[in-house]
Image (cartoon, rainbow, N blue to C red):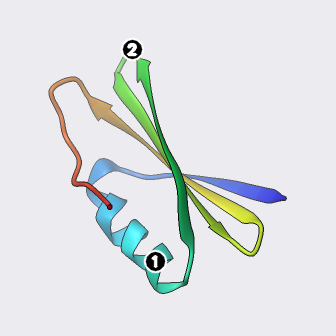
Amino acid sequence: MNQQFIIIRPQELMERAARFKKEDCRLVQILCTRVDEGYELTYSFDRNYFLYHLRLTVPLGGSVMSVT
């Protein structure tokens, strides 16, 4: 299985997630880890055994829209 990490800004999340859905990718997991800058979020999508990971950092007190 191959994979690719894609670093994005929080405001890009909805557009990127919608694009993956349109391309028949499956949302596999959402991971949240505490980092010095706030929270690091990783959204993993699968298509034909290839994983795409969208990674973004949200500052403390920040928020993102739900992709589900």
Considering every residue shown, the one lying at the far top of the view is 36
> Residue 35 appears in which quarter of the rendering?
top left
* Residue that badge 2 annotates: 36
Q: Nearer the viewer, residue 27 or 61?
A: 27
Q: Position of residue 33 (x, y in %)?
A: 45, 25
Q: Quadrant of the N terminus?
A: bottom right
| Mark 2 vs mark 1: in front | 1
The label number, if any, that marks residue 21 in the structure image: 1
Assess disc 1: are there few (<14), some (14-19) or many (≥20) residues with their C-alpha within 10 Å of its C-alpha: few
In the image, what residue occupies the spot 32% across and 61% down? 68
Label located before the other in sequence (2 or 1): 1
Disc 2 is placed on an element classified as loop
Considering every residue shown, the one lying at the far right of the view is 1
Work out whether 53 lies above or below 19. Answer: above
In the image, what residue occupies the spot 53% across and 49% down? 29
Disc 1 is placed on an element classified as helix
Work out whether 22 lies above or below 46. Answer: below
Assess disc 2: are there few (<14), some (14-19) or many (≥20) residues with their C-alpha within 10 Å of its C-alpha: few
In the image, what residue occupies the spot 36% across and 27% down? 39
